[in-house]
Amino acid sequence: MSRFRLEIRVVPRPGLLDPEGKAIQSALHSLDYEQVHEVRVGKLLYLNVEAASSEHAREGAEAMCKRLLANPVTEDFEIDVGEAVEQTVPA
Amino acid sequence: MSRFRLEIRVVPRPGLLDPEGKAIQSALHSLDYEQVHEVRVGKLLYLNVEAASSEHAREGAEAMCKRLLANPVTEDFEIDVGEAVEQTVPA
């Protein structure tokens, strides 16, 4: 088994309203950053996961996104599996 | 002037407690995803910005992070400037 570091990006679907993004955009405008035309806000998750291979790590993360981490109606997710961080030797 | 798409990742500094990450980790454990050893949660921001060059776009984004988007005490940020999306011709 190895440890993998996963980066998961959960973002609102295109076309859906993003009230948090709108709020940040108007805060930026009120600070005179008028060059900002759109802001969308997502969640960034870093997971440290034990898995037999990077494919297993990815499959597990997809299942977690569908069950808990992302809202399947309003959000999309992307998963990047990093290099194996360390080998873990079973005791 | 061109439009640039920026990706900004705002993450809690290493070593700081991340209560949201801890909550997600224990939710995952209660769903039997015992292979998850650490979860850290950050913010992902996509900005559509008008700027003369990608360097200007990055400098503007750094200023925005320092003033509004990131907490300088508890968070680090990284900025990726994407390709120019379109040229904007002044009227």
Image (tube, coloured by chain):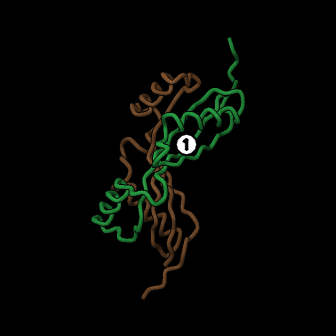
Chain colours: A green, B brown
Residue A87 x, y percent position in the rendering: 70, 25
Which residue is farthest bottom? B91
Query: Which of the image's four quarters has the N terminus of chain A?
Result: top right
Q: How many marks?
A: 1
Q: Mark 1 points at which residue?
A: A8
Residue B78 vs B57, above or below: the answer is above
Q: Which of B48 and B64 is in front in this view?
A: B48
> Where in the figure is residue B7, as x and y percent of width and height?
51, 57
Residue A84 lies, in percent from the top left, at 68, 33
Kindly give the residue lying farthest to the left in the view shown. A30
Percent coordinates x, y for residue A34 in the rendering: 35, 71
- The image quadrant that residue B13 belongs to is top left
What type is the residue that disc 1 sits on?
Ile
> Residue drawn 39% across and 71% down?
A35
- As displayed, is residue A72 above or below residue B57? above
Which quarter of the figure has residue A27? bottom left
The image quarter containing residue A62 is: top right
Instruction: Say whether residue A61 is left or right of residue A22.
Output: right
